[in-house]
Image (spheres, grey):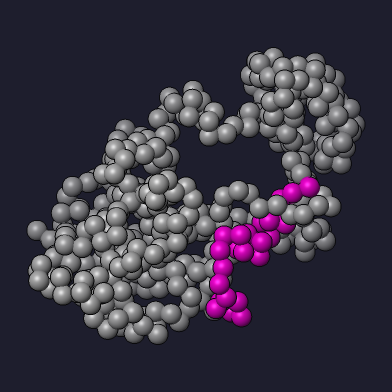
């Protein structure tokens, strides 16, 4: 039984039997492969022999142990291979028939310079799907530029929506651009596998995923708002310029609570909660455009109500009136939050070095099925013998490749 058959038989998860070779670095594309692994794909992580992937050095790192790497590349097997060397290139081409998907994130043309252009790849495996996730796409004047999450976020228009009016735009303290692009990558792979599984005669193809375009894709109303209304949406602090009330309010005991009322019935419930049931009849607040235009006035009323009460009084009343809200929670609060605890939203990933590590659960869930908890990400070359052995390399051949610095 080959590895593909074994992977298909050991799991009934939706992507079981799909084999992915992840040779991308850092976060965006690898995150997409990780999501596929959560849903049953067999993912092999390819690194350079020196284990120099920047994600291994990205915080958190504790006593030299790359914690981010371990949780970010969960569920993957690990091999090392320098495909820039002729023997490494040849070995990669021998591996490709074992896989359904190749994931890479190098600047356009890089793989071609290594002798791994699309023709060479498809000569090795005509049905291989190649996901290329780059900052700006394979074409266009910016295609060759370097980029990281904050660059994509700024260029896409996302960052321009964050911050206080008249002050510096703000990035969040997390590479959200990378993980959003990675989610698009996982969607792309899943969609590609639907095609390949339904058409046994289909040939492999190339997916050109721009991280900047992935972020821009989320911003549906911006182009039409600009063309039809001549509006350039910008930062509005914690308010929203498309719905009101929608803001962050501080209680008397210093707790910040996010509240939003994006429909007339919910606004009426907010008004009941704060003891002002007459406000929905006020001409300034009857409909959403009215409330957006008079957001200062409605916010002043809500802010005063919050400021006069402790958090427990506020949340009890909001719950009673079924108003959408949440405390602004840190991870210290999330780990004990009853909703997260009840759904086991934090799982323990088995780890050979540290026993286990906490990480977010598999999302989404399949009702009635238990998804297998993945182990943490691999050490460099941890599965070299297994993966390379599956294509016929014995211990002597592997040792020779190690001496050459190929694996």
Image quarter of the C terminus: bottom left
Q: Is residue 83 above or below residue 167?
A: below
Comparing 352 with 308, the one in front is: 352
Whether residue 2 is visible to the viewer of this picture, yes or no, is yes
Residue 295 drawn at (x, y percent)? 84, 37
Whether residue 286 is visible to the viewer of this picture, yes or no, is no
Residue in the picture at 62% in, 64% down: 151
Is 141 part of what is drawn in magenta?
yes
Q: Is residue 59 above or below residue 398?
A: above
Residue 116 drawn at (x, y percent)? 34, 81
Residue 292 drawn at (x, y percent)? 82, 40
Is 328 part of what is drawn in magenta?
no
Which residues lie in the magenta part?
A: 140-164
For residue 76, side relative to residue 359 (left or right): left
Comparing 224 with 120, the one in front is: 120
Residue farthest front in this picture:
63
Residue in the picture at 41% in, 40% down: 359
Q: Is residue 299 above or below residue 11?
A: above
């Amino acid at each position: 039984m080959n590895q593909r058959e074994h992977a298909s038989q050991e799991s009934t998860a939706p992507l079981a039997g799909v084999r992915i070779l992840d040779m991308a670095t850092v976060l965006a594309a690898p995150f997409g492969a990780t999501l596929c692994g959560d849903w049953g794909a067999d993912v092999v992580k390819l690194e350079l022999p020196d284990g120099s992937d920047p994600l291994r050095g990205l915080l958190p790192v504790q006593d030299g142990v790359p914690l981010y790497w371990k949780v970010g590349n969960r569920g993957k097997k690990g091999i090392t291979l320098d495909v820039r060397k002729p023997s490494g290139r040849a070995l990669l081409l021998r591996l490709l028939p074992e896989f359904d998907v190749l994931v890479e994130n190098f600047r356009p043309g890089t793989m071609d310079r290594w002798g791994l252009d699309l023709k060479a790849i498809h000569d090795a495996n005509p049905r291989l799907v190649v996901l290329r996730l780059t900052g700006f796409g394979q074409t266009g004047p910016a295609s060759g530029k370097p980029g990281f999450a904050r660059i994509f976020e700024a260029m896409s228009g996302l960052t321009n929506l964050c911050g206080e009016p008249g002050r510096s735009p703000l990035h969040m303290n997390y590479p959200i651009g990378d993980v959003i692009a990675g989610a698009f990558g996982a969607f792309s792979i899943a969609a590609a596998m639907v095609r390949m599984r339904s058409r046994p005669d289909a040939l492999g193809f190339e997916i050109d995923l721009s991280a900047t375009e992935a972020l821009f894709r989320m911003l549906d109303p911006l182009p039409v708002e600009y063309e039809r209304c001549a509006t350039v949406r910008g930062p509005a602090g914690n308010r929203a310029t498309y719905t009101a009330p929608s803001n962050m309010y501080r209680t008397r005991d210093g707790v910040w609570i996010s509240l939003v009322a994006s429909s007339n019935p919910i606004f009426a419930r907010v008004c009941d909660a704060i003891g002002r049931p007459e406000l929905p009849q006020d001409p300034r607040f009857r409909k959403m455009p009215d409330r957006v235009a008079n957001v200062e006035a409605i916010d002043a009323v809500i802010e005063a109500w919050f400021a006069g009460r402790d958090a427990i009084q506020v949340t009890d009343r909001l719950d009673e009136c079924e108003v959408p809200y949440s405390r602004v929670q840190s991870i210290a609060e999330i780990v004990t939050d009853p909703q997260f605890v009840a759904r086991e939203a934090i799982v323990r990933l088995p780890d050979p070095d540290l026993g286990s590590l906490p990480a977010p659960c598999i999302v989404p869930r399949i009702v009635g099925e238990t998804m297998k908890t993945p182990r943490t990400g691999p050490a460099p070359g941890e599965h070299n013998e297994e993966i390379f052995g599956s294509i016929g390399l014995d211990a002597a051949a592997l040792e020779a490749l190690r001496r050459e610095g190929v694996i």
